[in-house]
Image: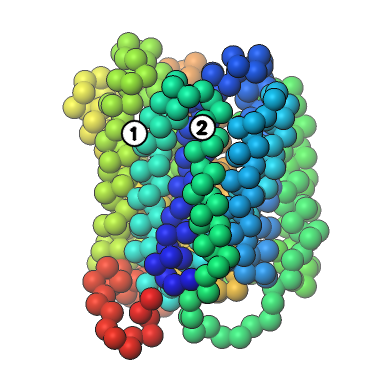
Amino acid sequence: MNRRLTLACSVAGAVLVALDGTVLTVAQPSLQGSLHASYAEVQWTSTAYLLVVAGLLVFAGRLGDRYGQRRMFALGMLGFGAASAAIGFAPGIGWVIGLRVVQGVFGALLQPATLGMLRAAYPPDRLAMPLAVRTSAIGLAAATGPLVGGALATWLGWRSVFFLGVLPALAFGLAALGGKAPRVSTPRVSTPGLDLPGALLLAASLAPLVHALSAPGAATVPALAVSAVAGVAFVRHERRAAHPLLPPGVIGAGPVGAALGILVAVSAALFGTLFVETYVLQRGLGLDPFESAVRSAPLAVMMIASAPCCPALLRRWGARWTTSVATAVLALGGLVLSRATGALPLGVGFALLGAGFGTVMVAATHVVVRQAESTAAGVAGGLQQTALNIGPVVGVAAATALMDAGPRAALCVFAALAAAAVPVARALPQRGSAHGALDADAREAEVRVLPGDPARP
Protein backbone atom coordinates (compact mmCIF):
# COMPACT_ATOMS: atom_id res chain seq x y z
CA MET A 1 0.00 0.00 0.00
CA ASN A 2 1.79 3.16 -1.17
CA ARG A 3 1.62 6.48 0.61
CA ARG A 4 -1.18 7.88 -1.50
CA LEU A 5 -3.35 4.87 -0.75
CA THR A 6 -2.35 5.02 2.92
CA LEU A 7 -3.47 8.65 3.06
CA ALA A 8 -6.69 7.81 1.23
CA CYS A 9 -7.45 5.00 3.71
CA SER A 10 -6.66 7.24 6.68
CA VAL A 11 -8.95 9.97 5.37
CA ALA A 12 -11.71 7.48 4.53
CA GLY A 13 -11.62 5.98 8.03
CA ALA A 14 -11.70 9.37 9.74
CA VAL A 15 -14.53 10.59 7.50
CA LEU A 16 -16.56 7.41 8.05
CA VAL A 17 -16.44 7.86 11.82
CA ALA A 18 -17.21 11.60 11.59
CA LEU A 19 -20.18 11.00 9.29
CA ASP A 20 -21.53 8.24 11.54
CA GLY A 21 -21.87 10.62 14.47
CA THR A 22 -23.43 13.52 12.57
CA VAL A 23 -25.91 11.60 10.43
CA LEU A 24 -27.10 9.51 13.40
CA THR A 25 -28.00 12.66 15.35
CA VAL A 26 -30.21 13.86 12.49
CA ALA A 27 -31.85 10.43 12.04
CA GLN A 28 -32.64 9.80 15.72
CA PRO A 29 -36.17 11.31 15.72
CA SER A 30 -37.12 9.13 12.74
CA LEU A 31 -35.55 6.08 14.41
CA GLN A 32 -37.48 6.76 17.61
CA GLY A 33 -40.83 6.94 15.84
CA SER A 34 -40.22 3.90 13.67
CA LEU A 35 -39.10 1.62 16.53
CA HIS A 36 -41.45 3.12 19.18
CA ALA A 37 -38.48 3.83 21.43
CA SER A 38 -38.25 6.11 24.45
CA TYR A 39 -35.98 9.14 24.59
CA ALA A 40 -33.66 7.29 26.97
CA GLU A 41 -33.38 4.35 24.60
CA VAL A 42 -32.58 6.63 21.69
CA GLN A 43 -29.93 8.40 23.77
CA TRP A 44 -28.30 5.03 24.41
CA THR A 45 -27.77 4.52 20.67
CA SER A 46 -25.13 7.23 21.01
CA THR A 47 -24.05 6.67 24.62
CA ALA A 48 -23.34 2.95 24.18
CA TYR A 49 -21.05 3.68 21.26
CA LEU A 50 -19.22 6.46 23.12
CA LEU A 51 -18.61 4.31 26.20
CA VAL A 52 -17.04 1.47 24.23
CA VAL A 53 -14.89 3.74 22.11
CA ALA A 54 -13.65 5.78 25.09
CA GLY A 55 -12.65 2.64 26.97
CA LEU A 56 -10.88 0.87 24.11
CA LEU A 57 -9.12 3.54 22.02
CA VAL A 58 -5.70 3.42 23.66
CA PHE A 59 -5.64 -0.38 23.92
CA ALA A 60 -6.72 -0.61 20.29
CA GLY A 61 -3.79 1.62 19.42
CA ARG A 62 -1.47 -0.75 21.27
CA LEU A 63 -2.92 -3.68 19.28
CA GLY A 64 -2.02 -1.79 16.11
CA ASP A 65 1.52 -1.24 17.36
CA ARG A 66 1.88 -4.95 18.04
CA TYR A 67 0.07 -6.55 15.11
CA GLY A 68 0.25 -3.82 12.47
CA GLN A 69 -1.71 -0.61 11.91
CA ARG A 70 -2.84 -1.73 8.47
CA ARG A 71 -4.36 -4.95 9.82
CA MET A 72 -6.19 -3.11 12.61
CA PHE A 73 -7.45 -0.53 10.13
CA ALA A 74 -8.76 -3.23 7.79
CA LEU A 75 -10.40 -5.15 10.63
CA GLY A 76 -11.93 -1.96 12.00
CA MET A 77 -13.27 -0.81 8.63
CA LEU A 78 -14.75 -4.18 7.68
CA GLY A 79 -16.28 -4.69 11.12
CA PHE A 80 -17.61 -1.13 11.26
CA GLY A 81 -19.25 -1.55 7.86
CA ALA A 82 -20.75 -4.93 8.78
CA ALA A 83 -22.16 -3.54 12.02
CA SER A 84 -23.63 -0.57 10.15
CA ALA A 85 -25.38 -2.89 7.70
CA ALA A 86 -26.71 -5.00 10.57
CA ILE A 87 -28.12 -1.91 12.29
CA GLY A 88 -29.91 -1.05 9.06
CA PHE A 89 -31.80 -4.37 9.35
CA ALA A 90 -32.32 -4.22 13.14
CA PRO A 91 -35.87 -5.22 14.15
CA GLY A 92 -35.97 -3.26 17.42
CA ILE A 93 -34.27 -0.62 19.53
CA GLY A 94 -32.53 -3.23 21.69
CA TRP A 95 -30.83 -4.62 18.61
CA VAL A 96 -29.76 -1.13 17.56
CA ILE A 97 -28.16 -0.43 20.95
CA GLY A 98 -26.41 -3.82 21.04
CA LEU A 99 -25.08 -3.43 17.51
CA ARG A 100 -23.89 0.07 18.33
CA VAL A 101 -21.75 -1.53 21.06
CA VAL A 102 -20.29 -3.87 18.43
CA GLN A 103 -19.76 -0.93 16.11
CA GLY A 104 -17.96 0.88 18.92
CA VAL A 105 -15.47 -1.97 19.27
CA PHE A 106 -14.57 -1.79 15.58
CA GLY A 107 -14.60 2.01 15.67
CA ALA A 108 -12.03 1.88 18.47
CA LEU A 109 -9.83 -0.40 16.35
CA LEU A 110 -10.21 1.89 13.36
CA GLN A 111 -9.59 5.35 14.77
CA PRO A 112 -6.03 5.08 16.19
CA ALA A 113 -4.96 3.19 13.07
CA THR A 114 -5.90 6.13 10.84
CA LEU A 115 -3.13 8.10 12.57
CA GLY A 116 -0.80 5.17 13.20
CA MET A 117 -0.70 4.31 9.48
CA LEU A 118 0.35 7.85 8.64
CA ARG A 119 3.13 7.80 11.25
CA ALA A 120 4.34 4.46 9.85
CA ALA A 121 4.13 5.56 6.22
CA TYR A 122 5.56 9.09 6.37
CA PRO A 123 8.90 10.18 7.83
CA PRO A 124 8.50 12.57 10.78
CA ASP A 125 9.46 15.59 8.67
CA ARG A 126 6.61 14.92 6.22
CA LEU A 127 3.69 14.32 8.56
CA ALA A 128 2.12 17.78 8.70
CA MET A 129 0.50 17.85 5.27
CA PRO A 130 -1.15 14.38 5.51
CA LEU A 131 -2.55 15.41 8.90
CA ALA A 132 -3.84 18.64 7.36
CA VAL A 133 -5.59 16.74 4.56
CA ARG A 134 -7.16 14.41 7.12
CA THR A 135 -8.37 17.34 9.25
CA SER A 136 -9.90 19.12 6.25
CA ALA A 137 -11.75 15.95 5.31
CA ILE A 138 -13.15 15.64 8.84
CA GLY A 139 -14.34 19.25 8.61
CA LEU A 140 -16.04 18.56 5.30
CA ALA A 141 -17.73 15.46 6.75
CA ALA A 142 -18.94 17.44 9.76
CA ALA A 143 -20.39 20.09 7.45
CA THR A 144 -22.12 17.75 5.02
CA GLY A 145 -23.16 15.04 7.50
CA PRO A 146 -26.33 16.75 8.78
CA LEU A 147 -27.44 17.57 5.23
CA VAL A 148 -26.81 14.04 3.95
CA GLY A 149 -28.35 12.43 7.02
CA GLY A 150 -31.39 14.69 6.89
CA ALA A 151 -31.98 13.98 3.21
CA LEU A 152 -31.63 10.21 3.63
CA ALA A 153 -33.82 10.06 6.74
CA THR A 154 -36.49 12.19 5.06
CA TRP A 155 -36.62 10.44 1.70
CA LEU A 156 -35.49 6.87 2.42
CA GLY A 157 -35.94 6.42 6.18
CA TRP A 158 -33.51 6.17 9.07
CA ARG A 159 -32.20 2.75 8.02
CA SER A 160 -30.62 4.24 4.89
CA VAL A 161 -28.35 6.35 7.12
CA PHE A 162 -26.56 3.24 8.34
CA PHE A 163 -26.15 1.83 4.84
CA LEU A 164 -24.32 5.00 3.77
CA GLY A 165 -20.86 3.85 4.88
CA VAL A 166 -21.09 0.14 4.11
CA LEU A 167 -19.59 0.18 0.61
CA PRO A 168 -16.75 2.64 1.44
CA ALA A 169 -15.88 0.57 4.52
CA LEU A 170 -15.76 -2.60 2.44
CA ALA A 171 -13.71 -0.99 -0.34
CA PHE A 172 -11.06 0.64 1.83
CA GLY A 173 -10.91 -2.26 4.28
CA LEU A 174 -10.15 -4.70 1.48
CA ALA A 175 -7.69 -2.24 -0.09
CA ALA A 176 -5.77 -2.06 3.20
CA LEU A 177 -5.68 -5.85 3.44
CA GLY A 178 -4.37 -6.22 -0.08
CA GLY A 179 -1.78 -3.46 0.01
CA LYS A 180 1.84 -3.61 1.05
CA ALA A 181 3.08 -1.31 3.76
CA PRO A 182 5.30 1.52 2.45
CA ARG A 183 8.95 1.32 3.37
CA VAL A 184 10.09 3.76 5.99
CA SER A 185 13.50 3.46 7.56
CA THR A 186 13.01 2.75 11.26
CA PRO A 187 15.27 1.08 13.80
CA ARG A 188 14.47 -2.47 14.82
CA VAL A 189 12.91 -2.62 18.26
CA SER A 190 11.20 -5.28 20.30
CA THR A 191 7.48 -5.87 19.86
CA PRO A 192 5.53 -3.84 22.45
CA GLY A 193 3.64 -5.70 25.17
CA LEU A 194 -0.13 -5.46 25.47
CA ASP A 195 -0.52 -4.78 29.23
CA LEU A 196 -4.02 -6.23 29.60
CA PRO A 197 -4.41 -5.18 33.28
CA GLY A 198 -3.54 -1.62 32.32
CA ALA A 199 -6.04 -1.71 29.45
CA LEU A 200 -8.81 -2.91 31.79
CA LEU A 201 -8.02 -0.25 34.40
CA LEU A 202 -7.93 2.51 31.78
CA ALA A 203 -11.27 1.36 30.36
CA ALA A 204 -12.72 1.23 33.88
CA SER A 205 -11.58 4.83 34.36
CA LEU A 206 -12.64 6.39 31.06
CA ALA A 207 -15.96 4.64 30.35
CA PRO A 208 -17.67 5.65 33.65
CA LEU A 209 -16.32 9.19 33.23
CA VAL A 210 -17.85 9.51 29.76
CA HIS A 211 -21.10 7.99 31.02
CA ALA A 212 -21.32 10.40 33.95
CA LEU A 213 -20.77 13.39 31.66
CA SER A 214 -22.90 12.33 28.70
CA ALA A 215 -25.86 10.85 30.61
CA PRO A 216 -26.08 12.62 34.00
CA GLY A 217 -28.52 11.22 36.52
CA ALA A 218 -28.69 9.21 39.71
CA ALA A 219 -25.67 7.14 38.70
CA THR A 220 -23.42 10.17 38.09
CA VAL A 221 -21.71 10.25 41.51
CA PRO A 222 -21.05 6.48 41.65
CA ALA A 223 -19.73 6.56 38.09
CA LEU A 224 -17.34 9.40 38.90
CA ALA A 225 -16.19 7.54 42.02
CA VAL A 226 -15.49 4.38 40.03
CA SER A 227 -13.63 6.44 37.44
CA ALA A 228 -11.47 8.12 40.07
CA VAL A 229 -10.57 4.87 41.86
CA ALA A 230 -9.77 3.10 38.59
CA GLY A 231 -7.72 6.09 37.44
CA VAL A 232 -5.57 6.02 40.57
CA ALA A 233 -5.12 2.26 40.24
CA PHE A 234 -4.17 2.70 36.58
CA VAL A 235 -1.46 5.25 37.40
CA ARG A 236 -0.02 3.01 40.13
CA HIS A 237 -0.04 0.01 37.80
CA GLU A 238 1.64 1.89 34.95
CA ARG A 239 4.49 2.99 37.20
CA ARG A 240 5.28 -0.62 38.09
CA ALA A 241 4.48 -2.43 34.82
CA ALA A 242 7.38 -3.87 32.85
CA HIS A 243 5.60 -3.04 29.58
CA PRO A 244 3.15 -0.23 30.39
CA LEU A 245 0.20 0.47 28.11
CA LEU A 246 1.33 4.10 27.88
CA PRO A 247 5.06 4.15 27.11
CA PRO A 248 6.93 6.77 29.16
CA GLY A 249 8.41 8.15 25.95
CA VAL A 250 4.91 9.11 24.81
CA ILE A 251 2.87 10.10 27.84
CA GLY A 252 5.93 11.24 29.80
CA ALA A 253 6.94 13.77 27.16
CA GLY A 254 5.98 17.31 28.17
CA PRO A 255 4.96 18.39 24.66
CA VAL A 256 2.64 15.37 24.26
CA GLY A 257 0.86 15.98 27.56
CA ALA A 258 0.46 19.67 26.71
CA ALA A 259 -0.87 18.91 23.23
CA LEU A 260 -3.39 16.43 24.59
CA GLY A 261 -4.55 18.90 27.22
CA ILE A 262 -4.99 21.58 24.57
CA LEU A 263 -7.02 19.20 22.38
CA VAL A 264 -9.35 18.42 25.29
CA ALA A 265 -9.76 22.11 26.16
CA VAL A 266 -10.37 23.43 22.64
CA SER A 267 -12.73 20.61 21.67
CA ALA A 268 -14.69 21.14 24.90
CA ALA A 269 -14.83 24.87 24.21
CA LEU A 270 -15.90 24.36 20.59
CA PHE A 271 -18.64 21.80 21.21
CA GLY A 272 -19.91 23.59 24.30
CA THR A 273 -20.14 26.79 22.28
CA LEU A 274 -21.95 25.04 19.43
CA PHE A 275 -24.44 23.46 21.86
CA VAL A 276 -25.29 26.85 23.38
CA GLU A 277 -25.31 28.67 20.05
CA THR A 278 -27.81 26.19 18.59
CA TYR A 279 -30.34 27.35 21.17
CA VAL A 280 -29.42 30.99 20.59
CA LEU A 281 -30.05 30.69 16.85
CA GLN A 282 -33.23 28.63 16.99
CA ARG A 283 -34.92 29.86 20.17
CA GLY A 284 -33.35 33.25 20.71
CA LEU A 285 -33.34 34.44 17.09
CA GLY A 286 -36.22 32.28 15.85
CA LEU A 287 -34.32 30.60 13.01
CA ASP A 288 -35.32 27.18 11.71
CA PRO A 289 -32.73 24.34 11.67
CA PHE A 290 -31.74 24.97 8.04
CA GLU A 291 -31.29 28.72 8.57
CA SER A 292 -29.20 28.10 11.68
CA ALA A 293 -27.05 25.63 9.73
CA VAL A 294 -26.44 28.29 7.07
CA ARG A 295 -25.43 30.87 9.71
CA SER A 296 -22.90 28.43 11.20
CA ALA A 297 -21.50 27.32 7.80
CA PRO A 298 -18.42 29.63 8.07
CA LEU A 299 -17.14 27.36 10.85
CA ALA A 300 -16.89 24.33 8.56
CA VAL A 301 -15.57 26.43 5.66
CA MET A 302 -12.74 27.90 7.72
CA MET A 303 -11.92 24.58 9.35
CA ILE A 304 -11.53 23.03 5.91
CA ALA A 305 -9.51 26.01 4.63
CA SER A 306 -7.26 26.52 7.67
CA ALA A 307 -5.96 22.96 8.03
CA PRO A 308 -3.89 22.97 4.78
CA CYS A 309 -2.35 26.30 5.82
CA CYS A 310 -1.05 24.87 9.08
CA PRO A 311 2.11 23.20 7.62
CA ALA A 312 3.31 26.58 6.39
CA LEU A 313 2.59 28.11 9.80
CA LEU A 314 4.53 25.33 11.49
CA ARG A 315 7.47 25.99 9.22
CA ARG A 316 7.41 29.71 9.89
CA TRP A 317 6.45 29.83 13.59
CA GLY A 318 6.76 26.31 15.00
CA ALA A 319 4.14 24.43 17.01
CA ARG A 320 4.32 26.71 20.06
CA TRP A 321 3.32 29.96 18.41
CA THR A 322 1.03 28.37 15.84
CA THR A 323 -1.01 26.63 18.53
CA SER A 324 -0.99 29.65 20.86
CA VAL A 325 -2.33 32.03 18.22
CA ALA A 326 -4.87 29.55 16.87
CA THR A 327 -6.21 28.83 20.37
CA ALA A 328 -6.51 32.57 21.01
CA VAL A 329 -8.40 32.94 17.72
CA LEU A 330 -10.84 30.24 18.81
CA ALA A 331 -11.36 32.02 22.14
CA LEU A 332 -11.96 35.30 20.31
CA GLY A 333 -14.58 33.59 18.17
CA GLY A 334 -16.45 32.53 21.30
CA LEU A 335 -16.38 36.09 22.64
CA VAL A 336 -17.73 37.47 19.35
CA LEU A 337 -20.58 34.95 19.40
CA SER A 338 -21.45 35.86 22.99
CA ARG A 339 -22.68 39.25 21.72
CA ALA A 340 -23.57 38.48 18.11
CA THR A 341 -27.13 38.66 16.79
CA GLY A 342 -26.78 39.84 13.20
CA ALA A 343 -25.70 37.70 10.25
CA LEU A 344 -22.27 39.37 9.86
CA PRO A 345 -21.14 39.10 13.52
CA LEU A 346 -22.39 35.52 13.66
CA GLY A 347 -20.47 34.68 10.48
CA VAL A 348 -17.30 36.27 11.86
CA GLY A 349 -17.62 34.42 15.16
CA PHE A 350 -18.16 31.04 13.52
CA ALA A 351 -15.32 31.69 11.06
CA LEU A 352 -12.91 32.44 13.92
CA LEU A 353 -13.98 29.24 15.68
CA GLY A 354 -13.36 27.17 12.55
CA ALA A 355 -10.01 28.76 11.72
CA GLY A 356 -8.74 28.32 15.26
CA PHE A 357 -9.94 24.76 15.72
CA GLY A 358 -8.75 23.53 12.32
CA THR A 359 -5.26 24.89 12.94
CA VAL A 360 -5.02 23.57 16.51
CA MET A 361 -6.19 20.13 15.35
CA VAL A 362 -3.32 19.82 12.90
CA ALA A 363 -0.61 21.42 15.04
CA ALA A 364 -1.41 19.59 18.31
CA THR A 365 -2.02 16.26 16.59
CA HIS A 366 1.27 16.68 14.77
CA VAL A 367 3.09 17.09 18.09
CA VAL A 368 1.43 13.99 19.60
CA VAL A 369 2.06 11.72 16.61
CA ARG A 370 5.54 12.98 15.75
CA GLN A 371 6.87 12.68 19.29
CA ALA A 372 5.98 8.97 19.33
CA GLU A 373 8.26 6.32 17.93
CA SER A 374 6.74 4.36 15.05
CA THR A 375 6.33 1.40 17.43
CA ALA A 376 4.07 3.52 19.65
CA ALA A 377 2.20 5.35 16.87
CA GLY A 378 -1.02 3.48 17.63
CA VAL A 379 -0.95 4.46 21.31
CA ALA A 380 -0.28 8.07 20.30
CA GLY A 381 -3.22 7.93 17.91
CA GLY A 382 -5.39 6.39 20.61
CA LEU A 383 -4.49 9.17 23.04
CA GLN A 384 -5.30 11.84 20.46
CA GLN A 385 -8.65 10.24 19.66
CA THR A 386 -9.42 9.83 23.37
CA ALA A 387 -8.79 13.55 23.92
CA LEU A 388 -11.13 14.39 21.04
CA ASN A 389 -13.80 12.06 22.44
CA ILE A 390 -13.64 13.34 26.02
CA GLY A 391 -13.42 17.05 25.14
CA PRO A 392 -16.80 17.29 23.37
CA VAL A 393 -18.51 15.26 26.11
CA VAL A 394 -17.11 17.64 28.74
CA GLY A 395 -18.14 20.66 26.66
CA VAL A 396 -21.73 19.56 26.13
CA ALA A 397 -22.11 18.52 29.79
CA ALA A 398 -20.80 21.91 30.93
CA ALA A 399 -23.05 23.71 28.44
CA THR A 400 -26.09 21.89 29.80
CA ALA A 401 -25.19 22.92 33.34
CA LEU A 402 -24.49 26.54 32.34
CA MET A 403 -27.66 27.16 30.34
CA ASP A 404 -29.53 28.36 33.43
CA ALA A 405 -26.99 31.18 33.76
CA GLY A 406 -27.89 32.42 30.29
CA PRO A 407 -26.29 31.81 26.88
CA ARG A 408 -24.04 34.88 27.01
CA ALA A 409 -22.47 33.80 30.30
CA ALA A 410 -22.07 30.23 29.03
CA LEU A 411 -20.34 31.37 25.85
CA CYS A 412 -17.97 33.58 27.86
CA VAL A 413 -17.07 30.60 30.05
CA PHE A 414 -16.13 28.53 26.99
CA ALA A 415 -14.12 31.42 25.56
CA ALA A 416 -12.27 31.60 28.87
CA LEU A 417 -11.63 27.84 28.76
CA ALA A 418 -10.02 28.18 25.33
CA ALA A 419 -8.00 31.19 26.48
CA ALA A 420 -6.75 29.21 29.49
CA ALA A 421 -5.19 26.72 27.08
CA VAL A 422 -3.02 29.41 25.45
CA PRO A 423 -0.30 29.38 28.16
CA VAL A 424 -0.20 25.57 27.99
CA ALA A 425 1.10 25.87 24.44
CA ARG A 426 4.40 27.17 25.87
CA ALA A 427 5.29 23.52 26.53
CA LEU A 428 5.10 22.72 22.82
CA PRO A 429 8.23 22.72 20.64
CA GLN A 430 9.21 26.04 19.18
CA ARG A 431 10.63 26.68 15.74
CA GLY A 432 13.95 24.90 15.31
CA SER A 433 13.88 23.40 18.81
CA ALA A 434 15.58 20.19 19.82
CA HIS A 435 12.17 18.54 20.09
CA GLY A 436 12.02 18.01 16.42
CA ALA A 437 12.60 21.08 14.29
CA LEU A 438 8.94 21.37 13.46
CA ASP A 439 9.68 24.17 11.03
CA ALA A 440 10.92 21.52 8.60
CA ASP A 441 7.74 19.49 8.75
CA ALA A 442 5.76 21.86 6.58
CA ARG A 443 8.17 21.58 3.67
CA GLU A 444 6.30 18.57 2.40
CA ALA A 445 3.81 21.02 0.89
CA GLU A 446 6.59 22.25 -1.38
CA VAL A 447 8.51 18.99 -1.96
CA ARG A 448 9.12 17.95 -5.54
CA VAL A 449 9.84 14.22 -5.49
CA LEU A 450 12.52 13.27 -8.00
CA PRO A 451 12.95 9.90 -9.74
CA GLY A 452 14.85 7.57 -7.47
CA ASP A 453 13.96 9.51 -4.34
CA PRO A 454 13.32 6.91 -1.60
CA ALA A 455 10.40 9.03 -0.39
CA ARG A 456 8.61 8.66 -3.73
CA PRO A 457 5.29 6.73 -3.33
Q: Label 1 crowding class (10 Å Cα cut-off): few <14, some 14-19, many 20+?
A: many
- Compared with 443, 332 (above or below) is above
Specify the farthest residue to the right: 197
**Numbered label attached to residue 161:** 2
Q: Is residue 94 left or right of residue 53?
A: right
Residue occupying the point 64% across, 42% down: 83
How was the colour assigned to the protein in this rendering?
Answer: rainbow
Percent from the top left, x then y, of residue 43?
A: 62, 25
Which one is earlier in the sequence, the residue at label 2 or at label 1? 2
Q: Quadrant of residue 132?
A: bottom left
Q: How many numbered marks are there?
A: 2
For the point 46% across and 65% down, the residue is: 6
Checking the image for residue 42, the label placed there is none
Q: Is residue 383 visible?
A: no
State the quadrant of the C terminus.
Answer: bottom left
**Type of the residue with mark 2:** Val
- When asked about the image quadrant of residue 30, the answer is top right
The alpha-carbon separation of the residues under discs 2 and 1 comes to: 32 Å
Query: What amino acid does circle 1 point to?
Result: Gly
Instruction: State the image coordinates of residue 85 (x, y, percent, origin top left).
Output: 61, 39
List x then y, in percent, for residue 205.
Answer: 72, 46
Report the residue marked by disc 1: 334
Counting from the top left corner in percent of width and height, residue 340 is at 26, 23
Q: Residue at x 55, y 35 (%)?
A: 162
Give the structural element (helix, strand or loop) at label 2.
Answer: helix
Residue 426 versus residue 333: which sits nearer the camera? 333
- Relative to 102, does residue 400 appear above or below in the rendering? above
Q: Is residue 176 visible?
A: yes
